Image (cartoon, rainbow, N blue to C red):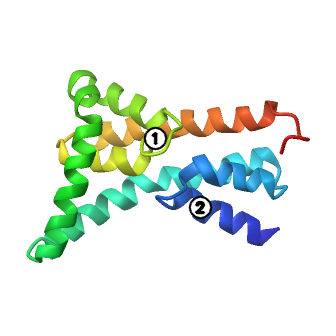
């Protein structure tokens, strides 16, 4: 069981999964749903502070390398294009709504990149991202809870 708990945490922390994949993984591997929610949410809440700091450090040390700059500019443009309208218009509320939609490419990683690129206040964007992640994880958990166990 500890294996599945660790994997649920790691999947929920990864950009490929976040809580959108980590929570269903935990439930499918028979971790109690409340524990799965806590693990998935905890890991997903760590994304913003860890990734924001990583972006800052990487930009500081790696910006001089052409391949890094090219990849960073590509990701920046993608994040800006997908989030700019809602975040510029609604600010932190727009960021929260963008992050809370439980669909691919709308999670904490893209929200963190968008907040960094658009120069949002760290504290406000952290709160907005955290609330969005909490709502997304709650939606996923409640959906799994109300699905008949035979379907899973």
Q: Can residue 19 be seen in this view?
A: yes
Q: Is residue 13 left or right of residue 24?
A: left
Tell me what residue is drawn at x 42 percent, y 47 percent.
Answer: 108
**Separation of marks 2 and 1 at Cα, in angstroms:** 17 Å
Dot 2 or dot 1: first in sequence order is 2
Spot occupied by residue 64 in the image (x, y as percentages of width and height): 8, 75
Image point (50%, 58%), residue name: 16
Position of the N terminus by quadrant: bottom right
Up the image or down, 22 lies above or below 105; here it is: below
Q: In this view, does 117 lie above or below 145?
A: below
Q: Mark 1 points at which residue?
A: 130
Which one is nearer the viewer's eye here, 100 or 66? Answer: 66
Q: Mark 1: which secondary structure?
A: helix
Quarter occupied by the C terminus: top right
Question: Is 50 situated above or below 65?
Answer: above
Q: Position of residue 59 (x, y in %)?
A: 17, 66
User: Mark number for residue 11?
Assistant: 2
Tell me what residue is drawn at x 21 percent, y 40 percent.
120
Q: Nearer the viewer, residue 90 or 53?
A: 90
Res. 5 mark: none
State the SS at label 2.
helix
């Amino acid at each position: 069981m500890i294996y599945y708990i660790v994997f649920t945490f790691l999947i929920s922390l990864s950009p490929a999964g976040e809580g959108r994949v980590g929570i269903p993984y935990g439930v499918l591997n028979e971790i109690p749903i409340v524990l799965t929610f806590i693990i998935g949410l905890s890991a997903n809440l760590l994304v913003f502070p860890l990734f924001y700091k990583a972006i800052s450090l990487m930009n500081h040390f790696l910006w001089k390398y052409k391949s890094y700059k090219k990849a960073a500019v590509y990701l920046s443009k993608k994040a800006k294009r997908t989030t700019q309208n809602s975040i510029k218009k609604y600010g932190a509320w727009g960021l929260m709504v963008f992050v809370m939609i439980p669909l691919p490419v709308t999670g904490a990683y893209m929200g963190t990149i968008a907040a960094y690129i658009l120069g949002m206040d760290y504290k406000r964007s952290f709160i907005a991202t955290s609330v969005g992640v909490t709502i997304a994880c709650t939606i996923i958990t409640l959906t799994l809870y109300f699905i008949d166990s035979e379907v899973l």
